Every structure is written in structure tokens, then in C-alpha cells.
Image (cartoon, rainbow, N blue to C red):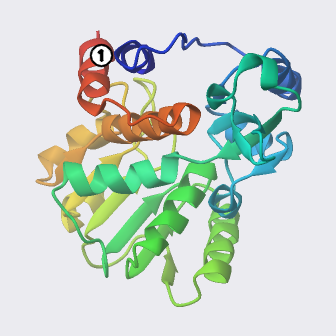
Amino acid sequence: MQNAAIAALKLNWRYLAFEVHPDNLRAAIEGAKTMRFVGLNLTVPHKLMALDMVDMVDARAKLWGAINTIVFETHDAEGAWIPLAKAKDDAIKEVRSHGFNTDADALVQSLKEDFKWPDLRGAHVLLLGAGGAARSAALRLAEEEVGTIFLVNRTEERARQLADNIAACYPRLIIRHGYPADPVDLAVNATSLGLKPNDPLPIDLEWLKSRRPARVYDMIYRPKETALLRAAKAAGCQVANGLGMLLYQGAESLKLWSGAAPPMQIMRDALEKHLHD
């Protein structure tokens, strides 16, 4: 996806994947800064840890409690911070790392597009999970003025902690624990259950069949159809996987690094061609 977009934008860049142990994350970020990478993407389990390892954190990323994108920046002639991609090599002196979260906006954009659902206001949402992905999803959905969020997590204490965090930021939002008695407008899987073939369902199957939420969204994009989505489809729900979220978070990262408008169709075509080969 990124390399297809980089080629279309005629940037002299290459997007590469690196395996980094959590113990070495700080050193990896500092190394990339020293080598003048334009930026980085971070995936699990680095998104929360990296908050304390960058020089600057975007205000919304700080609120959501995770970063998935780092932009390396330097000063321009007037002293303002700009992405390294916009600076001439001989003008680069001081460099800082700036963390952003492009996941949360990407989730909302994907929900609106995949379900043809332009307005989430007042929606009743069941959120599965209480980790970093669930936190950023809940807080971003609160921005959309959803009506109620029901939190379900394997560890109840973590769900309560998340509920307290959300309530502190959005006191008017109704937050409940456990499965609702009535159907909801949306159920979102923000856990990792479904990545492996033998994973248990992240949702109570009997509740899914009997309450039949209108829409079920799984943040997982590989496999293309998780066990959750198969069960939800069989129950008569609208379903979508995390491909749209992956697309939009990546496009926004590229925009932050380059300042250029991402070639969305090229990125989508590359994803659809290669992701499930």
C-alpha cells in the first residue's frame, strides 16, 4: 500500500518492515531519528510504550493514549518545526520525533464508508476489549456523540478502568458494563481474538444470535473473514473487516510524512491485491 503510493507520488523513499523487540523500541526510534528516516509506523505492542519515547506527542494522540505514527521533524528558516521531507539535507540540524495517532480517525471513516452510515450520533455501541485499541476507539466514538457505549472485556477491572477514563473526558456519554439487553447499532471487536484460526469468539455467540446487532465491525483485516464476522453474517448482521481502517490510517500517515494528498485508489488497489494473497 505505502510503496504503491510512494511510487505514484514519485518520492525517493522506500517503506520497509522491521521486527523490533519491545526492549529495543527506544533505541530503534532514536536510531531512525539519527539516520533521518522521514517517519515510522508502529504496531502492537509498541503503540502505548512509544508515548514516552518520542519528543512530542500530538494532543489527540495523548488523549487517546497511543501513537501509531512518528514524524521526524526539523526547523525551517523561521524556526518552525516541519517534517524532514520538506527540509533540504544541508539545512537539517536538530531533529525531533513527533507522535501521532491515525488509527482512531481511520476507524470512524471506515465505519461511515463501509456501512454507508454518515452520522453516528446517538448510536448504541458494544465495544469488545479494553486495551489501547479499545481506548482510542471509545474516545473517538465519543467525539462522534454516540449515545451509549457498552464495554465487554475478559478482565472486568480493565473495563472499569477504561470506563473511568472515558467518563473523565466525556462525562455526558452513557457507559455501561456487560452485554445490553436490547440490540445495538454497532458491535466493534477491538481485541486480537480472531487473528489465529483456533481463537475463541470475542463475543458471546448466544447474545449475538438473539440480539443481532445491526452492524459488526472487526478491526482485524487478516484473515479477511474472521470467525466473528462469519457468525455475525449468519445472524443477519451487516459486517465489515478492518481493511478500511488499515487504508485510512496508512493514508493519513503518508500525508503527515510527505504533506502530499495520498493516492487513495492506488493504495486501496494495492491492499486488495496483496493483503489476502
Residue, x 84% and y 32% (percent of image)? 95
- The image shows residue 96 at horizontal and vertical percentages of 82, 37
Q: Which residue is mark 1?
A: 276
Residue, x 26% and y 41% (percent of image)? 229
- The image shows residue 68 at horizontal and vertical percentages of 62, 39
The quarter of the picture where the N terminus appears is top left
Residue, x 44% and y 20% (percent of image)? 2
Q: Quadrant of residue 73?
A: top right
**Front residue (pair 53, 33):** 33
- The image shows residue 222 at horizontal and vertical percentages of 37, 25
Q: Secondary structure at mark 1?
A: loop
Q: Quadrant of residue 263?
A: top left
Question: Relative to 227, is 147 above or below?
Answer: below
Residue 204, can we see it? no
Q: Quadrant of residue 89?
A: top right
Question: Relative to 172, is 160 above or below?
Answer: above
Residue 7 shown left or right of residue 231 in the figure = right
Residue 116, can we see it? yes
Badge 1 amino acid: His
Residue 251 shown left or right of residue 129 in the figure = left
The quarter of the picture where the C terminus appears is top left
Question: Relative to 164, is 137 above or below?
Answer: above
- The image shows residue 167 at horizontal and vertical percentages of 62, 81
